[in-house]
Amino acid sequence: MNYERNPYGYDKGEATWDGGGILASLASEDERTAFIRRTYLHLLGAVIAFVAIETVVFTLVPEETLGSLMLGMFGGQFSWLIVLGAFMVVSWLARSWASSDTSIGMQYAGLSLYVIAQAVIFVPLLYLAVYHSGQESLLPAAAALTLFIFGGLTLATFITKQDFAFMGRFLWFGGIAALGVIVCGIFFQFNLGFWFSAAMIVLASGYILYDTSNVIHHYRTDQHVAASLALFASVALLFWYVLQIMMSRR
């Protein structure tokens, strides 16, 4: 899940930084192509790492043990609120590291930390999908639909080369509003329901358009780690609510 976005931390008018990178939109064709390739390879690596972590968890940890762990971590009224708050703090730290110009090692540490945080927060939802949905095809179907939406939005952005940077402000307000609704749902114990999940899919789709256009126009060519983290966050948010809707309908 992802409810907070960070600005790039640079002025769009600046073409280069001390680190030697240049804005992708101003780079040569070869440099831009190499940057985009690195970004999406790192995104693929993050997805594979996420799947590997969840596979290890659900393969090695017995259902009873996992159920007891879920009850202990999320059984209280405000347990999920605490977990969500901790996730947001870790997400902020991971994004800061991934955007750091200190070292490439720090950037990879940020991406790794974020993947692990997403894997942890996904465990309760995947637990329900794996053990209580009654549908073995649920996870593959949700993953396929997520990939289809992400692929379509990515392709459309690259074909049109539209700059969706203007959406940043609206997406930020949308994320804050969504977080407010979730917190109210936890405090007052009401189900957010189908339409909230549908709205979150729209929000996640907006993030994908925004992040993809940033890869084309606004990231530096040495920021492939930060760019892949942003894309992974948007994909994870999309997958979370696609899976929520499919579980609710079945």
Image (cartoon, rainbow, N blue to C red):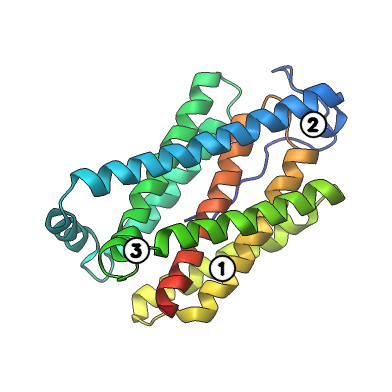
Dot 1: what SS? helix
Label 2 with label 1: CB-CB less than 8 Å: no
Query: Up-down: is 25 above or below 237?
Result: above
Dot 1: few (<14), some (14–19), or many (≥20) neighbours within 10 Å?
many
Residue 3 in sight from this viewpoint: no
Query: 217 or 241: which is nearer to us?
Result: 241
Q: How many marks?
A: 3
Sequence order check, earlier mark of 2 and 1: 2
**Which of the numbered marks, if any, corresponds to residue 136?**
3
Quadrant in the rendering for residue 126: bottom left
**Badge 1 is on which residue?**
200
Q: Residue at x 77, y 28 (%)?
A: 33
- Left or right of 8 in this view: 118: left
Q: Position of residue 127 (x, y in %)?
A: 28, 60
SS of the residue under disc 2: helix
Hey, which quadrant is residue 192 in on the image? bottom left
Circle 3 Cα neighbour tier, 10 Å, few/some/many (<14 / 14–19 / ≥20): few
User: Which mark is drawn over residue 215?
Assistant: none
Query: What amino acid is found at the position of numbered circle 3 in the picture?
Result: Glu
Q: Secondary structure at mark 3?
A: loop
Q: Earlier in the sequence, mark 3 or mark 2?
A: 2
**Residue at 73% from the left image edge and 25% from the top image edge:** 34
Residue beneath disc 2: 24
CA–CA distance in space, label 1 to label 3: 25 Å
- Direction front: furthest residue: 137
> Along the polypeptide, which appears first: circle 1 or circle 3?
3
Eye-nearest disc, 3 or 2? 3
Q: Is residue 235 above or below residue 38?
A: below
Q: Quadrant of residue 37?
A: top right
Residue 228 x/y as whole percent: 60, 38
In front of the other: 55 or 103: 55
Residue in the image at 46% along x and 38% along y: 48
